[in-house]
Image: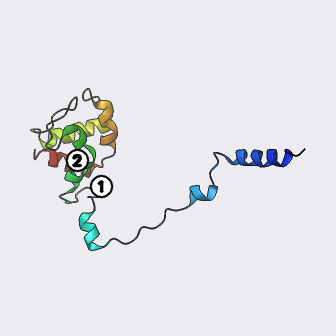
Amino acid sequence: MRSSPFLLITALALAGCGQRDAAQETAAPAPQAAVTAEQADEAPLPVAAPVAAGDAEPDVGRLKYAANCLSCHGASGQGMGPFPKLAGQSADEIAGKLRDYRAGKTVGAQTATMVPFAKALSEAEVDAVARYIATF
């Protein structure tokens, strides 16, 4: 019966494997330290927050494009691989396609890829991104 304490300890240790502490799962994230002006100049651009219709924030389109479109459509909208060229299209054309994607319409071969991106945009963001793309 000398192995009984060993078996008990081993069984208790194995019983706790893979379980998370409930306090860890519900704990709020630790607050971040304040950012100095020098650090803010070096920090990457934040992803723009959703904007309300009528907001005249000029960088919203650029920021949303950089965060969501650039990796597939390129820095100047020239398209890459299977992703089409956007440059040369009007803001109305781009906004119309984005709204069609949001409505679940099939627009082209990349519809399944585009739907989640388009659905994540507000109406004002659709217009801002479309206006930005029209500058290419």
For the point 22% across and 47% down, the residue is 65
| Residue 58 seen by the camera | yes
Residue 65 circle label: 2
Q: Quadrant of the N terminus?
A: top right
Where residue 38 sits in the image (x, y, percent)? 25, 71
- Whole-percent x and y of residue 58? 17, 58
Question: Left or right of 6: which side holds 64?
Answer: left
Amino acid type, residue under disc 1 in the picture? Val
Please state which of residues 11 and 100 is positioned toward the viewer in this rendering. 11
| Number of other residues with Cα within 10 Å of mark 2, as a class: few under 14, some 14 to 19, many 20 or more | many
Q: CA distance from mark 1 to mark 2?
A: 10 Å
Q: Residue at x 19, y 57 (%)?
A: 59
Q: Position of residue 120 (x, y in %)?
A: 33, 45
Quarter of image, res 55: bottom left
**Quarter of the image where one finds residue 91:** top left
Foreground of the two, 48 or 14 = 14
